Amino acid sequence: MVGYRDISFSEVSIIKEVWERNRKFHEEISKFFKHLYTDIVFEERINGFSSFDQEHIKITLAENTDNNRVLGYCISTFEGNKGEPQTLHVIEEARGKGIGKELMQRHMEWLKSNGCETITITVSYENYNTIEFYKSMGFMPNTIEMRLK
């Protein structure tokens, strides 16, 4: 059985193992920018969220209720009327069970309930399955950021 719960920023280290799997996944699928993912350190990435007060950040875990194993997480933030799911990951062996969709729906509801009129998401161009997932959630491509190798 899967349970969902919100945690405070001070508890965010709970997601470190799953976050690291997300980082490695992106490193493996990236054809041109592997080095960007190789160089990311959990503590540094998460520190970027420390400027948000508790009312402007939401961290939700999906857990196996039998053994408390973290199956996925989502972190979202907002400022003013603009919100963004910042990072979402469901471990490979738990995919296809609606966990990512449930996490996103909870975060979309939270962002909207906090007055967000604009909700954006950033996804790697090479992450085709995730792009399709976000399209199924109602997101549509708007711009493409391009970088020199």
Image (cartoon, rainbow, N blue to C red):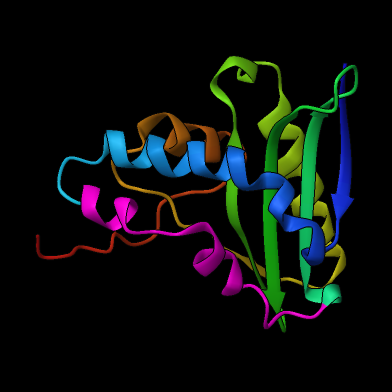
Q: Which residue is drawn at the image coordinates 66% and 33% (left, top)?
A: 100
Q: Is residue 29 left or right of residue 25?
A: left
- The N terminus: image quadrant: top right
- The C terminus: image quadrant: bottom left
Nearer to me, 44 or 108: 44
In this view, 107 is above or below 72: below
Q: Which residues are magenta?
A: 34-53
Nearer to me, 114 or 28: 28
Residue 111: tell me if it is visible. Answer: no
Rendered location of residue 86, percent (x, y)? 58, 59
62 part of magenta stretch:
no
Q: Residue furthest left?
A: 149
In this view, 104 is above or below 144: above
Residue 93: tell me if it is visible. Answer: yes
Rendered location of residue 76, percent (x, y)? 69, 60
**What count of labels does the image hold?**
0
Rendered location of residue 114, percent (x, y)? 84, 71
Rendered location of residue 91, percent (x, y)? 59, 27
Q: Which residue is drawn at the image coordinates 59% and 73% (left, top)?
A: 47
Quarter of the image holding residue 94? top right
Q: Which residue is drawn at the image coordinates 17% and 40% (left, top)?
A: 31
48 part of magenta stretch:
yes
Q: Which residue is drawn at the image coordinates 40% and 35% (left, top)?
A: 25
Nearer to me, 126 or 135: 126
In this view, 54 is above or below 125: below
Q: Is residue 88 left or right of residue 44?
A: right
